[in-house]
Every structure is written in structure tokens, then in C-alpha cells.
Image (tube, grey):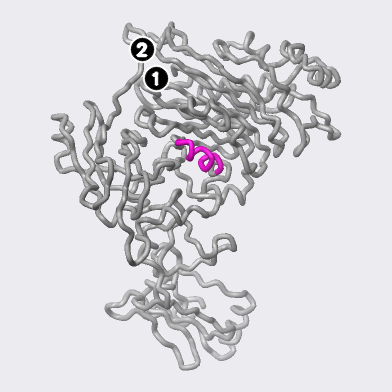
Amino acid sequence: ITVVTWNVGTAMPPNDVTSLLHLNTGETNDVDMIAIGLQEVNSKINKRLKDALFTDQWSELFMDVLSPFHFILVSTVRMQGVILLVFSKYYHLPFLQDIQTDCTRTGLGGYWGNKGGVSVRLSIFGHMVCFLNCHLPAHLEKAEQRKEDFATILHMQQFEGRVANGILDHDLVFWFGDLNFRIESLDICFVKYAIDSNVLNQLWEKDQLNIAKSTWPVLRGFQEGPLNFPPTFKFDVGTNKYDSSAKKRKPAWTDRILWKIKSPSSGLEAGRHRPSQGVLSVSQLCYCSHMEYTVSDHKPVAAIFAVQFASKVDKPPIEIYVADEWSRPEQAVVRYKMAVGFHRSSWDWIGLYRVGFRHPKDYVSYVWARSDDGDRCLEKQLCAQVMFSEEALPKGNGEYILGYYSNTSSSIAGVTEPFQISLPRSDEGSSPTDSSGSSSEEDDSTLVLLAPKSRSPSPGKMKRHRSRSPSLAKFQGLILRPSSRDRGMSRSPSPQSRRGLPRDIPTIHVPQKEVGQAADSLEGRSFYQTVQEQGGPRCVSTDSPLGRADPRNLGLLPALRLEMIDQVLGRRQENVDQGYYPCRRVSPTSPPGSCTSPKEGCSP
């Protein structure tokens, strides 16, 4: 398990993070999971509004970098600028169950999320593990406040289920982040001398966290490797030089990674030990900082752990059987077998993924796992069967994986080995279901996939989604002007856009001397739009492209008309001078003739 922590200081992501994740070493082949904790991700209002709809650029970067190495995003949680991402090799996904997230705010007395902790807990091969990413209060004199905040996080975060309801109830806890502990007593000159002379051990005994581990009961049992790397704070941005500003902050090991194994005495349940108690072992193989990253005033810190459990659940909840190759549509048959005790749902589905997919929603197509005899198959341990339709299959050649997504556990409960799909391409061009390639140059942000407590939407909400990452729905008739980098490409089409926008939608030119707009409801038609032209008003039906172009026909937007203030006031004064009073229409569905003049009790 690789754990990374980095206070990014609101900076943009660097171009390359392979060395940070140790992807350029032989260790990558042995790593099964990666947990990444970020602090101070840009959370200004404009960024938060975008990130509320789209995944932040840091998460996008890590998914892009890790997916070629077969790492899949298991879960993520964000609290303002504090983000936690957990990745795993795809073939481990069926053995990662009971995934839950939580977050605790401690800033401004618990009302602000600039400080606090976020966590992802899950069962790994039957053993409960929790990853906790924290950003604690800053400054040398706030040590007691850091202790209180950490105790609050441990107390407030509670999970559902029969076991491991609290953080410290888990078999193994990884605690990391910008913990903000400083170096006491020693002046800045001696600290810099010790760093330059590489005698870091002379600073260890004055490190506040080292002191707290032996004096604070809340930290009892937490372990940390030796600090054989220089303090990671505070640097001049863009350099490897410590703070040269007027404040001249003293260097400190603010960014840390610790772990705790649950003691056997606290693992007694129903008169017996938990399977992992007494024999779970953790060895730290690497603990280092990365000086090559200079985008922040903090240096990132990474650690690699070898975790050994006493036992392992080696049978997945769902076993999927499929042919080695699909060369004809009729071969797209999927047989699956559910383990005893598996909680199936009518909302479970089987996704078809390209090798190198990034997250459970990054499917090419899917089929509902709604076999008519599903309950009987579960009871008698028989194989159920579903089939992909021909139009749902990707055309061309490629390697794919099938995954059974459990709606109950919000995770993938079964996967296959990679298999080949070789289907002829359509003569008419690429199939509408084979559009995953269209997202290869998509914008660097996508829809939030796994929000705290509600991890990812069901396929019904993302029907026929094909791209690597879902994006905003493109409603028919609503034309948005793309940015220069997006012009000419699709950003992850949604079901509404599959039908395509009509090519003949005209441009509506509204003259400045527009007389007004009236709407009439005629029998058998839900909406008509009146446009004033030289030839007089004309009615436009919703069946025409022009009618569909009106946002009010979407049923999702309010009836609004945006005009210049001086135009409206000038036209209103002109109408009053001529004795004409415009009719006030509340919405396109308002009954016609509901108001004709101010004399009838309706203000213009």
C-alpha cells in the first residue's frame, strides 16, 4: 500500500507525478493500493462552483496517470480543500467491500472545512482498514488545539455496520496529512544548520509530534518511520529554498504519515478474536519526501507499506463467466454466479470496460443484472444469464473487462480477466455506442463521481454513457457556445444528446426595436412562440427546430428573457406613451388572457 500526502497550496497540478507515486520504479508492480491525501486544493468560490459539477483537476491528473497501470479509483471524498483518493488494482475490486466515507470540519469551531479530516474506510480481503487524511491547525503555539481537533475527528466520525464503527475500531488505520506539528525550542539558525549538515536526528526530540506520541493518550499505538528526509515546510514556491520572506518561518516536518494496528485486547467480539488480531503485521518499506516538486510551499511525502493479514477472503461475491472473444453479437452472453449471502438488487448491473478504465462508472456499455430467475439462481447456486444487445457493443478490436456493480455495496463485486472483442465497424461510421475515444481530448474536468455518503450515480442516471468520465447532459435544443479548446469535440455525451441536435436550427436574431412577445395556447399544442418580424407575428410549434431551441421547452429551465435594462425601460416608456400595456405572462403554461390591462388588477 502506497500512501501520499501533499499540501498543494492552491497550486495547479504539475505535468508529471510519476516519481511521486513511485511509478517509474520496479516497486509499482508489487503495489496493490494507493491512497492520496491532498490539502489546500483551490477552494475559492469560482473553483468550488466548477468542482461541484466537475471533478477537480488534481483528481483527474491522478486518474489519468494511474489508469495505464491498471489502478482504478475505488472511492474519494472531499471537504473544501481536503481531498482523499483511494485507488486499487482492478482485480482486487471484488475483495474491497463495505466502502464508506466521512468528513469532520474543525475550522471556525466546526463550521468551516478548511481544517478537519476526511476518511475512507473499507474491508480489504475481509479486514477493516481506514485511511484518514487530516489538515490540523497551524503555528507553533497551537499544539494543544491540534490534539483537541484530532480527538474531535476520532469521536465524530462513525460508520454504519456491525463492526468497526469508529476509526480506531478498524484493524488498521493510516493517519496522514498536513498535521502542522512544528519544532520546539531550537532557533531557526540551528535548525537550518542541522538540515545543511544532515544531522536531522538532532531535531527529532524537539519535534512536537514525537513528543506527543509519548504523552498524548489519543496517539497511543500510532507508529511512524524515522524522519530521514529534510523538513517539508516552508519553501519559497518554485524553489528548494526555505522561507526567505520577512516572516522567515522555521522549517518543520508538518507533513506526516503514521499507522496504527488494532491491539488484540480491543478486538474481542462475542468471546473470540477477530481473524486478523495478533498476526496482522505492517512493515514500512519507504518513507521519503520529494524535493523535485516545487509548485507548493510544502514538499509531498510518500510511504510504501507491506501489510500481511492472517487470512484472506479469496472468493469474490460474484463470479462472471464469459467467452475468450466476442467476434459476433450473439456471443455477447454473460453468465454469473452469486455467492451465498450476497445481497442482490434489481439495480445491479454489469458494465463493459476497456482495459485501463479509471473508475466504476467509466464503462463503455452496461446491461441490467435483472435475470428473471435471479432469486432462484441465488438460492440454488445456479448461474444467471444476461446478454448485451448488438447496438450496445463497441465496434472494432480491443481488450475489455466485465464488472458486476452492486448497488447495495456501491462497489464492483466481480470482474473478469481481459478478453477480446472483434466486431466489424459499421459502414455508416462509428457506432453511437462506441464513442469512448471522443473523450481522449476532453476538458481536464469531469463530473464528480463519488461524493461523500453517496458514491456515484446508478446507470439509469447515466444511461448509455460511453466516455471515460461523465459530463454535463446536453439537452436537445440547448446550444452552448464551446470554449476554444472544446470547440469541435464532444464532452462526454449523455443520453439526451444521442439523438443529435438538428442541423437546421436557425439563428434567432432579436432586433433592438422588438415590440414584444406573446404566447398563445392552442388546442393540441403545448407551446407556441411569437416572434415579431416585418411580416407580422408568426407561431412556431414545438415540433419545429425553432420551437425545440427555446429553453422553456426543456422542462428544466425557468421561463426567462434576458434583455438590456435600457432597452426594456425605453420600450416600456414608449408603450405607455402610446397607451399600450404589455401583458404579464408568468410562464409558458399560464392560461391565455389571464391579464389584459392594469385595470383588471395586473401590474404591467
Residues at marks 2 and 1 touching, judged by CB atoms closer than 8 Å: yes
Query: Which residue does the image show at 43% across and 36% down from the upper left?
Result: 453
What is the quadrant of residue 22 in the picture?
Answer: top right
What is the secondary structure assignment of the residue under circle 2? loop
Q: Position of residue 169 (x, y in %)?
A: 44, 17
Query: Which residue does the image show at 29% across and 43% down from the upper left?
Result: 349
Q: Residue furthest bottom?
A: 535
Find residue 264 and name its label.
none
Magenta span contains residue 315 = no
Q: Amino acid at mark 2?
A: Pro
The residue pinned by badge 1 equals: 127
Instruction: Answer left or right for 391 relative to 383.
Output: right
Q: Report the magenta residues as a range.
A: 61-70
Q: Position of residue 74 (x, y in %)?
A: 44, 35
The residue pinned by badge 2 equals: 275
Return the residue nearer the eye: 206 or 237: 237
Q: Position of residue 264 (x, y in %)?
A: 43, 7
Return the residue nearer the eye: 221 or 74: 74
What is the secondary structure assignment of the residue under circle 1? strand
